[in-house]
Amino acid sequence: MGREDSMHRIRMSGPVCRAVTVMSAILALAMPSAVAAAEPAPGESDPSPGACSLAAASVTRTINGQPYLLRVPSGLTGAAPLLVALHGGGSNPGRHETQSGWTPFAAQQKFIVAYPQGGKNDVTDPNRPGDRSWYFENGNRHDVDFLLQVIADIESHWCVDTKRVYMSGHSNGGQMTSRMACAASAQLGAVAMYAGGSHGGCEDGVPIRKLSFGFFTADNDFTQAPVYAAHLQWRGTIGCSNDAATETGPEVAEGYRYSCEQGANVVWRKYKAGSHDWPSGDRGADVRNRMWQLFQNHPIS
């Protein structure tokens, strides 16, 4: 098991092999949802109030002490898509920005990327002061509310196409993405995870839109089975057909696309060999390209 997500062990049970995560520490209480407006980091400033901004930006903004990195590419000519990219457990926004490759990809495709920091301070190593994890469990709204506030803060300052807001997550960030697919389906066009897992399923009584979801993993990833169980669970949640279209790609061992209710899709993509780490090289490019294709095809309608 790698450094990231060493605390998020996952076991299998239930008729559809539902992935259940067991945390190694008692969860802190969720913080109140009402927070002050986001503040720019020292030396940075907000765009002019009033009209939204198309200006390029590379800034850190903070909501109640919880930061996120914002990358706005140059050359925007109108409202742009927004991707919220979540790091893995015991990691941080800057590391995920480097590993995921989303920032240079977004510069080419002309969309905005935000890299928030998880709210769970469960890393005890003093040499890793900025590493965090996510409160993904049902019943704890700390990071649900924070991520909704991140989206609202960006939309209030930069020109965002609110029908094209998406989320991706790695590992524990994938579990948080799963939680947001249930808790924030009205705000998200589509979502995807790499090497993640289920957060436990949508809470009873929580209305959800039939949200398209991409599930990515690798043969040698220890979370392969939980990712597979999570994709089965989501297919059941949004009413998908059992028939699938076959997909191919660089180093892809299995690739399927399922048609679901309300025009949604579920994508299952497993790579040969690999590991729990977010992939690089041709495989990393394929992950970004396939996730982005899923996102582009599924704005909020």
Image (cartoon, helix red, strand yellow):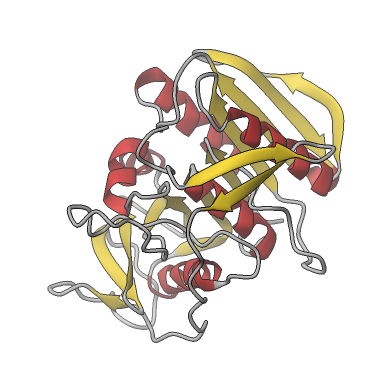
Residue 87 image point, x, y percent: 40, 49
Residue 185 image point, x, y percent: 67, 60
Q: Residue furthest left?
A: 43
User: Residue, x 51% and y 26% (percent of image)?
Assistant: 221
* Residue 220 can be seen in this image: yes
Q: Is residue 216 above or below residue 272?
A: below
Residue 231 image point, x, y percent: 70, 37
Instruction: Choose top left, top right, bottom left or bottom right for residue 131.
Output: bottom left
Residue 14 image point, x, y percent: 81, 41
User: Residue, x 32% and y 59% (percent of image)?
Assistant: 70
User: Residue, x 52% and y 69% (percent of image)?
Assistant: 148
Q: Front-most of 104 and 25?
A: 25
Q: Quadrant of the N terminus?
A: top left
| Residue 149 shown left or right of residue 94 in the figure | right
| Residue 64 shown left or right of residue 145 in the figure | left
Q: Front-most of 288 and 195?
A: 195
* Residue 186 can be seen in this image: no
Count of marks overlaid on the render: 0
Q: Quadrant of the C terminus?
A: bottom right
Q: Is residue 139 above or below residue 291?
A: below
Instruction: Choose top left, top right, bottom left or bottom right for residue 253.
Output: top right
User: Residue, x 48% and y 14% (percent of image)?
Assistant: 273
